[in-house]
Amino acid sequence: TNLTFASGYPQGSITSDALAVFESRLDELSNGELGARVFELSLLNLRETPAGIRDGMADMGVVLTPYFPADFAHTNMVAEVSMSIELTDGGSDQAGLVYTGAMSEFIFLNCKECRDEFSAQNQLFLGSAATPPYSLLCREKVDSLEALEGKNLRTSGAQWARWAESVGANPITMSVNEIYEGLSQGVVDCSVQSTSELSVFNLFEVVDDITVNYPSGVFSGVGSANMNLDTWRSLTDAQRQALLEATAILSAEFSWGYEKGAVDNEATARDQGIGITQATDAMNADNREFIEADLKTIAEAYSERYGIENAEAKIATFRELLGKWQGLINDVQSSEELADIYWKEVFSKVDAAQYGL
Amino acid sequence: MFAIGKYLSKITNFVSIIGGLAIALMMFHITADVAGRYIFDSPMPGTITVVSYYYMSIAAFIPLAFAEQKDAHISVEVITERMPRWMQHNLERLALLCSLTVFGFLGVRSFLEAQRKFSSGASIVQGNSEIPIWLTYFVLPLGCLLMVLVVAYKLISSFLPQETGLDTERAQADDIDQQD
Amino acid sequence: MTDVQIGLSGLVLLVTLIALRIPIGVSLIGVSFGGLWYLMGFNVAWGSLGIVPYQFAANWVLSSVPMFLLLGFICYHTQLTQGMFRAARMWLSGVPGGLAIAAVFGSAGFAAVSGSSVACSAAMGRIAVPEMVKYRYDPELATGTVAVAGTIGALIPPSIIMILYGIIAQESISGLFLGGISAGILTAIGYILVILIRVKINPNLAPDTNETIPLSDKVWALRDTWPVIMIMVGIFGGLFGGVFTPTEAGAVGASLSLAVAAIKGSLTWERFRNAILETLLTTSALIIIAVGASLLTRFLALSGAGVYLSELIIGMDASVVVILLAIVVIYILLGMFLEPIGAMLLTLPIVLPIINDLGLSLLWFGVVLTKLLEVGMITPPIGMNVFVIKSVVGNLVSTGQVFRGIFWFLMMDLLVLFVLMAFPEVVLFLPGLGS
Ligand code: NA
Ligand code: NA
C-alpha cells in the first residue's frame, strides 16, 4: 500500500529531511508492504491538513493543533504550558526532545480526551514533535527588561502574546510569509521563535541579535504523522506495528532536526557576526514569575472556553511527565538514540491490535 | 418572469452592500491597525483573523451572483465569436448549465462543511484572544445559493422570449469618455 | 489510463471547455473535481471541494489583491491620476506610445511596493487603460501593456515568489531581491522597446498629440500631479520606513488615496461607492478563478503530471544548454495552466537538484525561475494578469483581445529570458556588489 503523506512544509525544510528518513524506514520495517508518497506543500497546506486527512485527500499529514483551538483543545492546553519547562531542573536543555516525549506519552497513554478529539476528526495520533526553546530573534540587542518595553514582537501563540504584554511589549501577529519583510523593514523588532527557524525562514539576513532561550517555551502542538482512521483500520496488525515503529522514528527525526538546526544556526549566526545575548538574572526571575502565574490562567481559560474538566489536574499530570522525560533525555547524541528512547518508553507500549480500532 | 428577475436583482444588489461593507471595513481596519501599531504602540487585536476570515470570505463569495448578474465572470470568447448566432446561444446555455452544476456541488459541499464547523465552534487564536470563525464558513454556501438562483433563472429565461429583468448595468464601466 | 495520462487529459478537457466559452473558474473547478474523482475516488474530490475554496480565500496575504484593486478604482473614480497622465502626455509628446511607456513606469513603481504581479496589475489596470483609450490608443496595446507590466511586480522586490524560493532553496533572499532588480529593469526596458518599435511601425496604435506644447504649459501641467506624488510618497515612505508590510500597503494606499481625494475635493459618496462595488465585482470574479487554479494544482500533484514532465529532464543525458532549454519549455507549458507558486512547488523538488548538479548558481536560477513563472501569468489559457486587466476594464475589451495584446511583449519576454540565461552576470552583478 502506498500512503499519501501531505506535509505543509516546503521541500528542503527540516521536516523534509525527517520525512525522507520516515519513507525509507517505513519501507524497511514493513518489508516493502507500506510505502509513503510525500507531497510537500503541493497537496495540502498546514491549514488544510486536518480536514484533508479527515476526508481522505491524504492518508497522513503533519497537523499543527494550535491552528484549530476548538478541535484539539486538550492537546492544545498541554502544548500551551510549554514555557513551564523553565521551572524544571533541566530548563531549556534539549527542551524540544523532552517535550516530544512527554507529549507523545501523554496523548498515547494518558489522555483519552486528546485521542477522542483526533478521532472526531476521523484521524488518529501517531506521534508528536516540538521545536527547541523560543528565543528573541531581533533587529537589535535586547538585554534587559527595559529594552523590551514598547517593542513590537511577532508572536505565534497565546502564551507568548501574554508574556509579551506582561513585559510591556506589543504582541504582533504576522503570517510566516511576512516575517522576513517584517523584520527587514522594521515593522516588528523581534520575532519570538526558535533559533532553528533562522534557517527555516531564511532570517539570518534580517536578524542582528538573538536573546537565546528567552522567553523559552516550545511549539509542540504537533501531530507529526496523523493518519486517516479508515486507512489505519484497513491495515493489518503487522502493518500498523511497522507504522508505529516508523512514526516513532519520524517524531525523533523531526524534533532532532529542529534541535540540530538550532545548534547549527547559533554557530552560523556567530560566524555571521549576529550577536548572541543571554537573558539577565532579572529577566529570568521575572520570566519565571510570569510562567507560574500563567499556568493558572491557562487552566482557567481552557476549562472556561472548551469545558475541559479537571484542567489543573491534567496539567499537573503532564508536568510530571515532563519532569520524567527531562530525566530520560540526557544529552542525546543522535536521532537514532532518540528514536530508541521514544520507541522504548512510549510507542512500543501502544497496542497495534487495539489502538484506534 | 420579468418580475422574478427584478426581485433577484434586488437580492443580489442588497448582498452586494454587505460585500461592499467588507471591502470598506477591510481598508479601514488594516489602516487603523497600522496606525495603532506605529503611532500608539497598540495594534488592533485580531486584525489578521478578522480580515482573512470575515472580510475576505465575504468579499470573495458573497458577490458571486452579483458578478454573474453583471456578466463579470471571465471567459475566453476567441473561438466562439466566429460561430453562428444560434451556436453561440446554445453555448451560452451550456455555460450556464456548467455553472449551475459546479456551484450547486460547491454550495452543498460547503454547507455541509459549515455545519460541521458550526457544531465544533471553529475559532482562531490571535495574540491572546480567541475569535470564532465558524460563522464565516456559511458565506460560501450562501454565495453559491444566490449564484445558483441567478444562473438557473438566466438559463430558464434563455428559452423564453421576454427580457430577463436583471439589472446588468455595471457601475460606470463604460463612462470612460464622460470623465475629464 | 495511467495517472499521468489522466492529468494530461484533464488539461486537454480544460482547454476545450475554456474554448467553448465556459467561464474559466467553472472550467477549472469542474475539471479538477472530475479529475480528482476519477483519480482518487469521489470522497477525495468531494473533500477537496469542501476544504480548498474557503481556505484559499480566507487568506491574509491575499487581502492585498482587493486592496490594490480598491486603490486603483479610487484613484480612477476620484480622478487622482488624470493630472499625472495629462502631464505625461504633454512631456512625452513626440515619444511614440508615450502613455504606454508611462504605464510601464507606473507598474515598476507599484512593483516596488507590492509583492505580487496580480496586485500590481490590479492597481495599475484601471488607472492606466482608460487614460490610454481616452487618447485613442489601440485597446489591445493599452491592455496588453498593463497586463505584462504587472509581471514586473514579482521581479522587483518585494516578491512573494522570491521569498518562497529563497526559503526552499536556502538562498539569500536579499541576494534574490537584488538580482530581481536587474531582471525587473531589463524587463521594463524590453517592454518599452516593444512599445516604441510597434508604435513607430504603426503610429495608429498610439496617436500623437501632433501639436507643439509651450514649455510654460508643460510646467503648469505638473501642478496637477501632486495627488499622485502625495500617495507615492506616503506608500514608499511607509513601506521603507518600517510602518507597514507589503501586504498592508494596498489598504494603507487606498486609505491614503481616499484622503487625498478628499483634500482635492473630488471625493463624492457616489464615486466611493462605485469604487467599492467595482472592487467587489472584480475580487469575486478573480478569486473564483484562483480557487479553481488552486484545485487544479492538487489534481495535477496527485496525478503526478508535473513530476512526470520535470522527470523527463532528468532522463536526458544532454548538455547544459539543452537541459536549460528543456526547463524553460517545461515551465512555459506548466505556466500556461498553473499559478506560479503551484508550479514552483510541484517542480522544485526535481529541478533544484538538477541545477545544483549542473553547478549553476541557485541564486541566478531563482531569478530566472521567477521570470519564467511570471511569463505564465500572461499566457493563455490561464493568465491571471490578463484576467485582472479584463476584469478591471469591463466590457471595453474582450479577454481574447488582451491575450492578443500581449503577443509581442511575450516575444520580448523570451528575449529577456535568453539574456538572463546567456549572461548570468546581468543577474549576479548586483548581488555580487552586495556581498
Ligand atoms: Na514587487
Ligand atoms: Na498562463
Image: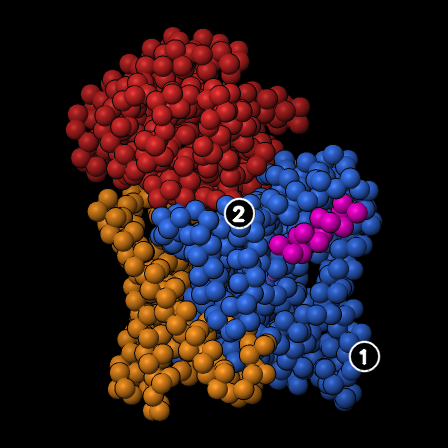
Q: Left or right? Give the position of C231 relative to A318.
A: right
What residue is drawn where x is 46% and y is 37%? A4
The Cα–Cα distance between marks 2 and 1, rounded to whole angstroms, is 51 Å
Name the residue nearer the viewer: B175 or A53. A53
Rendered image: mark on residue C327 = none
Name the residue nearer the viewer: A115 or A72. A115
Q: Is residue C257 above or below residue A73?
A: below
Name the residue nearer the viewer: C235 or C303. C303
Q: Is residue C327 a member of the stretch shown in magenta? A: yes
Residue placed farthest to the front in the image? C1
Mark 1 lies on residue: C200
Q: Position of residue C153 (x, y in %)?
A: 62, 58
Q: Is residue A130 a member of the stretch shown in magenta? A: no
Rendered image: mark on residue C3 = 2
Q: Position of residue A103 (x, y in %)?
A: 34, 22
Q: Left or right? Give the position of C393 relative to B100.
A: right
